[in-house]
Image (cartoon, rainbow, N blue to C red):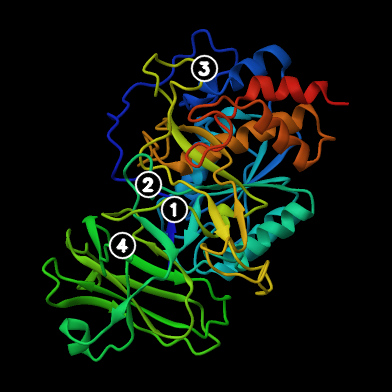
Amino acid sequence: MKVNRVPSPFRSHPALTSRLSPKGLSFFIGSLTSQGYVSHEAQQVIAKYGFTGSGVKVGVLSDSASPARVAALIASGDLPANTVVLPGQDGGAGTDEGAALMEIVSDLAPGAQLYFATANSSQAQMAANILALQAAGCSIIVDNSTYFAEGVFQDGIIAQAVNTVVANGAMYFSSAGNMGSLDKGTSGTWEGDFLDGGAITSGPLAASGETGNFHNFGTAANPQNFNVLTTSTSFISLKWSDPLGGSSNDYDLFLLNPAGTAVTAFSAGTQSGTQDPYEIMVCVTNNQLCSFAVNSRIVAVKVNGDTRALHIDTEDGQVSIKTSGATFGHNAAASAITAAATYWNSARTGTKPFTGFANTTEIFSADGPRKIFYHPDGTAINGSVLFGDNGGTTLQKPDLTAADGTIARTPGFNPFFGTSASVAHLAGIAALIKSARPSLTNSQIRQVMIHTALDNMAVGWDRDGGFGIAMALPAVQAALLLP
């Protein structure tokens, strides 16, 4: 199952009804222009240096960009006339979120040529489209999608495609997601090592025929064999630190009513050596998504096998016992640049350049870091697959922060909240840098963006905002000074 990084219900910003005025803008793009054009100082890059992203091809992956919507945006000047949708890859009936992403990229880098391919239908198709966009000449690729079944502790097929295009010279940008953060108090994530909470001997799980041992979400001194869902969600998943396609340790996932007296949902597949380490519960009623009840109890069970690191994700829900580490999958791949979100007017000063610490991340912006235990081929990185043994590698994710809550002409995206909007701004900034210095490698552009970012959370890298807010003007100026 796949989800796009759509705006989170945590957002509380008022809807924006006005658009930027062309007065005073050196380059006004289309009928509507993202406030990020000014906030990230792309406007100043174009005014002072004339760099517009010309000569750069940017590939976008999202749910859809319908022919009718793309044509309308070209007609209004909100997309360039040479925009390309890969044949058969417009995504069909969808939200046209891909068109909205392309609008933002074009607002910041109006000279760039845009390409689109859907992220829909399967992980394999998304991975193939990533490769196809590079084959079409895209040196910058950006997406805002993820699949629930993607690996948390190992690169899956999409992350491996990201690794391939980056190794071949492209830059890859991906949204962190809108699953909340521990420091903001909005996390819907719990991860850590399995802690034995005792055997199932009675109660609703025993009555259902489940065997095995509870996971203790608390401590040895203060055990609690369940976590509480404190806001509603349609999805709850459990993953653990076995290799993808090779899980021989069997874990199950249950949801109990708030009193803990009845099972209301469960996922209890068998992992016997060839399956993914993955269980998911989806709330569906009459073929429509519904929401699991608030205060329901989430229960994880080790049916048999060895102790493993666990990751429980409630997508856009929240839990009572929470941790950091919300972003996962290819969105948090080591070779990707992962985007956190800050509201374009977070300092409440109007449409002006970001200043840094006044521009804190959105409360829904997913945090890091991301721990991985396996190489892409499924071999352990250093032998240990537990947090407590300091196994694997810890990735500093997210990498950078960018604007959201900006305007777009695509229906449904005015305003456009979420890390989806943010990651498109990062791609636009990268296109400006590349047009200023085409000879720079993807690694050099990445370092320029990081080294010129404005700290907006803790000093240096932090798990909410990465290295800070990417700024186009100082990044381009730094790129011009490189030998």
How far apart marks 2 and 1 lie (CA) works out to 7 Å
How far apart marks 4 and 3 lie (CA) works out to 44 Å
Residue that mark 4 sits on: 218
How far apart marks 1 and 4 lie (CA) works out to 19 Å
Q: Earlier in the sequence, mark 3 or mark 2?
A: 2
Residue that mark 1 sits on: 326
Camera-nearest label, 4 or 2: 4
Q: Residue at x 43, y 29 (%)?
A: 360
Q: Which mark is residue 353?
A: 3
Against 341, is 298 above or below? Answer: below
Q: Residue at x 32, y 45 (%)?
A: 186
Determine the image quadrant of residue 363: top left
Q: Residues within 10 Å of mark 3 (few under 14, many from 20)?
A: many
Instruction: Report the residue that reaches farthest toward the right.
Output: 483
Instruction: Report the residue that reaches farthest toward the front.
Output: 221
Determine the image quadrant of residue 159: bottom right
Element at label 4: loop
How far apart marks 3 and 2 lie (CA) works out to 25 Å
